[in-house]
């Protein structure tokens, strides 16, 4: 076969080099060229090029069935609470990660789309609790700005009450021992009843006649008892938010910038929403830095004692002047702004958790003085309600405006970053109308 190929090539070369004598010779050369081309094509078919060997692609290892089922349960729970995770197939993709990020936002956590074991457990527990008590779930959802999406976070803050202990069983009824087979059975022993000692009848007490002088001393003035006057109750952040949740539920949801029949209630709603977010945020920070409860109680108590005098009357001067005094203390302490911000967030959560207004006020002023000015909004709410201060609506508006101006100038929002535009509109309208 190789010899024939060489002959064919040689013939083609010789024909190509031969002189062109006439038209007939040209025709013959053309015909010869066609024949040679056919021969070369046939040789090529008889000697095909070597095949290229491709390495087969390895299939992805199969995932454990338990892992796939766990992802299916997660997708089902996300869809149940309104987070669109897509089909429940156990293969999380972009859609599921986006749903996880949205769920993390309602918890005040980092929205990275990577779910943690605690967050998985929270989803499953929340779905079980919702099915166990639909009436409770409906009430909580109505009071939450996220609706049903906010149920897992609500359940996380309000653990389920422990079940009542199972009643102690009664002692077995006493039975007489069985007689041998064929013998008459002894009658059953009656259940022993405890015998209580007889209570002697009380001896009669002879009536004592009141002296005439004592009877005359009872006057109309003494007919009305006097237990003293009630002291005005201290303002409680917990009580305010409990009352606000009830009113919000009865109104069918939270006020918006477009629908705000009660500006005062709208301010209360935004405060309680921000308080919840700040509490969750500070608790997470404390966990991340490894702060124990004993350490938090000690250090936050020290900060409250050291800085309370700087906040004796924040209504007496503009926010900038008050924060400048706090900043002097921060600079003199030698602490970095980052460390100061961590302390402020942890102590703010502790103040809200324990309903300690003085601690929360010091923490808020520290954060605002440490380049986190939007936290001044919550200090404004405290001034409005009298949490740790004498209530002062005008000073309250000044502190809230100070915070809103900082956000407008580009400062990172203190709470609920995903709702900044909506909250800014609500607060601006509410403080103007209230």
Image (cartoon, grey):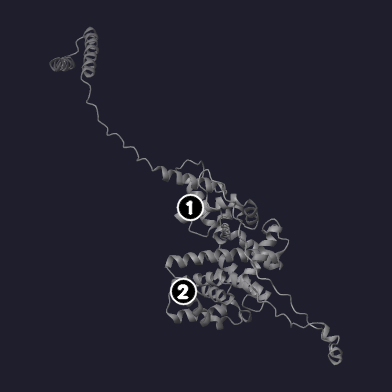
Which residue is found at the position 75% from the left and 79% from the top?
Answer: 203
Residue 85 position within the rendered picture, expressed as x and y whole percent measured from the top left: 51, 45
- Give me the C-alpha separation between circle 2 and circle 1: 29 Å
Residue 68 position within the rendered picture, expressed as x and y whole percent measured from the top left: 43, 43
Q: Which mark is residue 410?
A: none
Residue that protrudes farthest toward the top in the picture: 24
The answer to whether marks 2 and 1 mark residues whose Cβ atoms lie closer than 8 Å is no
Which residue is found at the position 59% from the left and 75% from the top?
Answer: 357
Q: Is residue 325 left or right of residue 219?
A: left
Q: Which mark is residue 294?
A: 2
288 lies above or below 206 = above
Image quarter hosting the N terminus: top left
Name which quarter of the figure residue 253 lies in.
bottom right
Residue 348 position within the rendered picture, expressed as x and y whole percent measured from the top left: 53, 71
Q: Which mark is residue 120?
A: 1
Dot 1 lies on which element? helix
Image quarter hosting the C terminus: bottom right
Residue that protrudes farthest toward the left in the picture: 3
Q: Nearer the viewer, residue 307 or 432?
A: 307
Assess disc 1: are there few (<14), some (14-19) or many (≥20) residues with their C-alpha within 10 Å of its C-alpha.
some
Q: Nearer the viewer, residue 118 or 430?
A: 118
Dot 2 lies on which element? helix
Name which quarter of the figure residue 191 lies in.
bottom right
Q: Nearer the viewer, residue 84 or 317?
A: 84
Residue that protrudes farthest toward the front in the picture: 183
Q: Is residue 428 visible?
A: no
Upstream in sequence: badge 2 or badge 1? 1
Q: Is residue 219 visible?
A: yes
Which residue is found at the position 59% from the left and 49% from the top?
Answer: 131
């Amino acid at each position: 076969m190789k010899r024939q190929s060489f002959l064919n090539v040689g013939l083609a070369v010789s024909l190509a080099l031969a002189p062109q004598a006439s038209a007939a010779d040209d025709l013959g050369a053309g015909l010869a060229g066609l024949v040679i081309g056919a021969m070369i094509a046939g040789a090529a078919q008889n000697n095909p090029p070597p095949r290229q060997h491709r390495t087969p692609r390895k299939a992805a290892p199969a995932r454990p069935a338990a892992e796939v089922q766990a992802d299916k349960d997660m997708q089902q729970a996300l869809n149940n609470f309104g987070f669109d995770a897509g089909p429940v197939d156990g293969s999380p993709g972009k859609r599921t990660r986006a749903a996880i990020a949205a769920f993390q936002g309602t918890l005040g956590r980092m929205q990275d789309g990577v779910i943690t074991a605690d967050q998985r457990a929270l989803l499953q527990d929340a779905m079980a609790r919702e099915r166990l008590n639909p009436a409770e779930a409906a009430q909580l959802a109505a009071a939450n700005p996220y609706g049903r999406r906010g149920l897992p976070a609500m359940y996380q803050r309000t653990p389920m009450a422990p079940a009542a202990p199972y009643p102690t069983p009664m002692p077995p009824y006493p039975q007489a021992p069985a007689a041998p087979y064929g013998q008459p059975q002894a009658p059953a022993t009656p259940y022993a009843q405890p015998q209580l000692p007889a209570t002697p009848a009380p001896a009669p007490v002879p009536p004592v006649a009141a002296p005439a002088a004592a009877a005359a001393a009872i006057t109309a003035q003494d007919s009305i008892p006097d237990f003293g006057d009630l002291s005005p109750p201290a303002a409680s952040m917990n009580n305010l938010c409990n009352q606000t949740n009830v009113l919000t539920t009865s109104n069918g949801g939270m006020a918006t910038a477009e629908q705000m029949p009660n500006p005062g209630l709208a301010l209360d709603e935004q405060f309680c929403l921000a308080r919840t977010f700040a509490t969750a945020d500070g608790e997470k920070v404390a966990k991340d830095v490894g702060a124990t409860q004993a350490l938090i109680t000690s250090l936050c108590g020290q900060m409250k004692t050291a800085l309370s005098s700087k906040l004796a009357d924040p209504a007496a001067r503009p926010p900038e002047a008050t924060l400048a005094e706090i900043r002097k203390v921060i600079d003199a302490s030698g602490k970095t702004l980052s460390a100061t911000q961590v302390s402020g967030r942890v102590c703010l959560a502790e103040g809200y958790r324990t309903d300690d207004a003085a601690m929360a006020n010091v923490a808020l002023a520290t954060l605002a003085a440490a380049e986190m000015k939007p936290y001044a909004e919550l200090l404004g709410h405290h001034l409005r309600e009298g949490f740790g201060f004498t209530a002062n609506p005008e000073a309250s508006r000044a502190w809230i405006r100070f915070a809103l101006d900082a956000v407008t100038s580009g400062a990172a929002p203190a709470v609920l970053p995903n709702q900044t535009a909506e909250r800014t509109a609500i607060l601006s309208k509410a403080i103007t109308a209230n």
